[in-house]
Image (cartoon, rainbow, N blue to C red):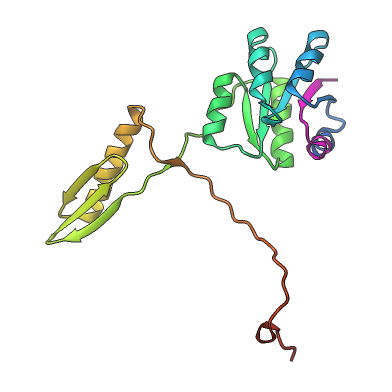
Amino acid sequence: MKRILYVEDSLTSQLIVQRMLGGQCEMEIAATPASALALLKDRTYDLVIADYLFPGCTGIDVIIPLRQKWSPMELPIIAVSSAMDSELATRLMNAGVNACVAKPLGIQQFRSLVERMLIAPAIEGTPPAVYTITCFQWYERGAFYEYCPELKILLSGPDGNELTLRMQSVLNDHAEKGAQLGFTAREAVRTYRVEREARPDQVALAG
């Protein structure tokens, strides 16, 4: 049976992954990158799954030492994190992981990824980083204008749609040259429950 080392300090996450992969492999758990490295001195594994955030350190503290000893094909590594975005995924891929997965984990997708890594390890690419850049466009005296404060670029022309395409082209050119643009886009919708005593006019009437 294939052996997996799961580096994770959350008891909840440990139980979730154990249930997901139960019967599919033999799993051992290390609560810290340091304890994972200690286990790897004396034991062999077919796959390492590593969380990213730990008190006082990160998953990179276990990824880099492993990559100095084993290649991605000899010992595949899957990085998981609730903070996973394109920027973090790029850092982790550069550190040497085979794949990155955002929490919460999708059961079927995660099982499938683990199975692929156990059968035929490969490096799975990550999507490109997406950045948000604010530009302002307005119409004045028969012409359209568009201004990008971040790059201090002002374009003008008779057609607003054509101007938008030109600005997109300029931004793409700067990105290809390695310019740091805008902010990585991460959006989330959260519902918060706040309890307080309702006023008489806020109480719904039954009827």
Q: Residue at x 71, y 30 (%)?
A: 55
For the point 23% across and 58% down, which residue is it? 138
Front position in the image: 19 or 83: 83
Residue 120 image point, x, y percent: 68, 20
- Residue 137 percent across, percent down from the top left: 26, 55
- Is residue 46 visible in the rendered image? The answer is no
Q: Number of marks in the image?
A: 0
User: Would residue 41 be counted in the magenta stretch?
Assistant: no
Left or right: residue 27 compared with residue 79:
right
Please give the name of the residue rendered at 34% of the width and 29% of the height, measured from the top-left corner. Answer: 176
| Position of residue 89 measured from the top left corner of the image (x, y, whole percent) | 56, 31
Point out the image quarter for the C terminus: bottom right
Q: Is residue 12 magenta?
A: yes
Spot the residue most to the bottom.
207
Q: Nearer the viewer, residue 103 or 107?
A: 103
Q: Residue furthest left?
A: 141
Q: Quadrant of residue 108?
A: top right
**29 or 21, which is in the foreground?**
29
Q: Is residue 147 above or below residue 96?
A: below
Q: Viewer-proximal residue, 39 or 93?
A: 39
- 57 above or below 161? above
Location of residue 26 (image quadrant): top right
Q: In x, y percent, where is residue 201?
A: 66, 86
Question: Residue at left 66%, top 30%?
Answer: 52
Left-right relation of 118 to 147: right
Q: Is residue 38 visible?
A: yes
Residue 68 falls in image quadrant: top right
For residue 141, side relative to residue 43 (left or right): left
Placement of 160 over or under 111, stated as above or below: below
Which stretch appears magenta?
1-15
The quarter of the rendered structure image containing the N terminus is top right
